[in-house]
Image: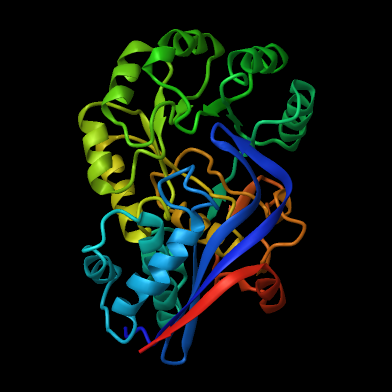
Amino acid sequence: MKIDSLEIFHVAMPLIYPWRTAYGADYEIHSILVKARSGDHVAWSESTPLQMPTYSPEGAAGVFTNVSEFFAPRIVGQGYASADEILAELSIFKGNQFAKAAIEISWWTLQSKIQNMPLHKLLGGDSKEVQAGADFGIQDSFEMLLSNIQKAVDAGFPRVKLKVARGWDVEMLQAVRSTYPNEKFHIDCNSGYSLDDLDMFKRMDDFNLEFIEQPLANDDILDHAELARSIGTPICLDESITGPRSVEQALMVKACNIVNIKPGRVGGLSNAVRIHDICNDAGVPVWVGGMLESAVGSAICVELATLPNFSYPGDLFPSSRFYERDLAQPEIQLTPRNTMKSFEQGLPEPDQQLLEQCTIKHKLITA
């Protein structure tokens, strides 16, 4: 496949309600969309690092610069038989997984168009429905949180994820568990704590959580292994898993019991599939994470989640959960069973008018 052009868009999508985590609040989601062309075929990808380098070392402005100024010019005009060849071409650049993913994923979506084959089939998945979970960031009050949890319980979601931060952790969990003693919960710390908080994590064993997601530093594996040995609650790694090698190391030292996979964070879909396979061979379950993408990126996560080892309900959100109107069409919707169907007839693509309204800057790279 020859890549004839890449058009890169930095967009900001206003949220209905702020998304609050241990690293702060996002009032709009900053994302990078790539429109890739090969001959008569056009396809889209999305990589969503957020506005500032708070979730990871990358922010949207930096990703846009790296993709448009350095990465895309190396790719456009060249032919690539596989996404691995794209990653090999970009391997001279250190890190920058979200930037690499923006281009790498576009190879997959173009290949899906060229072969007229659903993306999940290309990835090795099946045509099926994938299970979604409910997620809540830090709310204005415990009462607001409990009310939202009740809506998720009434809707039949199989699990609920709760963001935690200092001042919104043990007391919050006490309020939640006293109200919902039997529901499945896990918490996401977003790298907000350290081993100095070991006593607090030991207290969390009393809350019967499914697991604790990314409790310690984003670039750490060894301290997570120490924490895993010290508490009874399973550990899930998210930010620390940036590619196949990091997951191999994490499993080697028993730093986690379950792994979150986000295509952007790990450098694209090829690495996401490899991480899935490594964990599957090790008997470690995985689940798909989300970055509050538009329907473009959310659909790609749904397609990835059709692989067999994605056994825990994913961070897969209907468009209406965060946006008055999704940037891309058709919007992502849940079935009455709180599942999302794999995409048999093509992936969502941006609405041109909304894309123009949300775009901060864009650049076209041609051969």
Q: Residue 248 appears in which quarter of the rendering?
A: top left
Q: Is residue 275 visible?
A: yes
Q: Is residue 341 visible?
A: no
Q: Is residue 118 left or right of residue 81?
A: right
Q: Is residue 26 left or right of residue 79?
A: right
Q: Position of residue 161 (x, y in %)?
A: 59, 32
Q: Residue 283 appears in which quarter of the rendering?
A: top left
Q: Is residue 93 left or right of residue 196?
A: left
Q: Residue at position x 39%, y 12% from top?
A: 231
Q: Position of residue 144 (x, y in %)?
A: 78, 28
The C terminus appears in which quarter of the rendering?
bottom left
Q: Position of residue 134 (x, y in %)?
A: 64, 38
Between 258 and 124, the one lying in front of the other is: 258
Q: Residue at position x 48%, y 53% from top?
A: 59
Position of residue 130 relative to residue 152, above or below, is below
Between 304 and 325, the one lying in front of the other is: 325
The N terminus appears in which quarter of the rendering?
bottom left
Q: Residue at position x 56%, y 65% from top?
A: 296
Position of residue 123 relative to residue 193, above or below, is below
Between 5 and 245, the one lying in front of the other is: 5
Position of residue 217 relative to residue 174, above or below, is below
Q: Position of residue 51 (x, y in %)?
A: 55, 53
Q: Residue at position x 26%, y 61% from top?
A: 93
Position of residue 156 relative to residue 111, above or below, is above
> Farthest residue toward the bottom?
40
